[in-house]
Image (cartoon, rainbow, N blue to C red):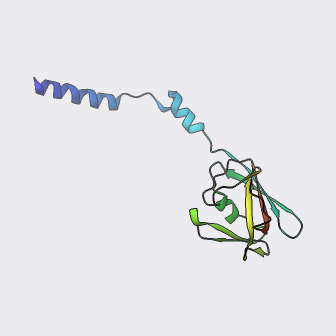
Amino acid sequence: MNKLWLVLLCSLVVSAGCVSEPESSSPKASVKKDAAVETGTVTLEIQGSGEPLTIEIADVSVGTSLEDVMRSVTQIPVSIRGSGVTAFVDGIGDQSASGTEGWVFRVDGVHANQGVGSTSLSPPTTVSWIYGDADDLVID
């Protein structure tokens, strides 16, 4: 009796693997096939001691870290120390962090509560970088 159940079970497993619908008629397959990665533009607003600068980075995928976006900037020099959760923007343009002065950022007007390597973006979005003294930069 046990052999009969084993044979039936093996037959079901084998036949289940052989019976399938063509990929084109499967709704899930066509959704996966047609699904595209969502992308958008990230606008960087940079406010240092000079004139404000706006840079647009196109075709940024949803979920891309701010660190990756900042590393892709070619219009001005960007200095980043560390990577991932330890990434720190040390300088943008000709202004580098020193003493109590440095760069802070907001994403869509909200002050970041984590670093650039941990901040995932959902374009379209605006990242505002502000340089100043830590005592003068209001964190809200």
- From what the image shows, is residue 109 above or below residue 90? above
Q: Quadrant of residue 91?
A: bottom right
Q: Position of residue 53 (x, y in %)?
A: 85, 63
Q: Quadrant of residue 75?
A: bottom right
Q: How many marks?
A: 0
**Residue pictured at 56% horizontal, 38% vertical:** 33
**Residue pictured at 52% horizontal, 31% vertical:** 28
- From what the image shows, is residue 81 above or below residue 42? below
Q: Position of residue 41 (x, y in %)?
A: 75, 51
Q: Nearer the viewer, residue 11 or 120?
A: 120
Among all residues in the image, which is located at the extreme front?
A: 135
Among all residues in the image, which is located at the extreme right?
A: 51
What quarter of the picture does the N terminus occupy? top left
Horizontal side of 14 relative to 52 (left or right) equals left
**Residue pictured at 68% horizontal, 47% vertical:** 122
Q: Nearer the viewer, residue 72 or 26?
A: 72
Q: Quadrant of residue 87?
A: bottom right
- From what the image shows, is residue 49 above or below residue 66? below
Q: Position of residue 138 (x, y in %)?
A: 78, 59
Q: Position of residue 114 (x, y in %)?
A: 63, 57
Horizontal side of 138 relative to 89 (left or right) equals right
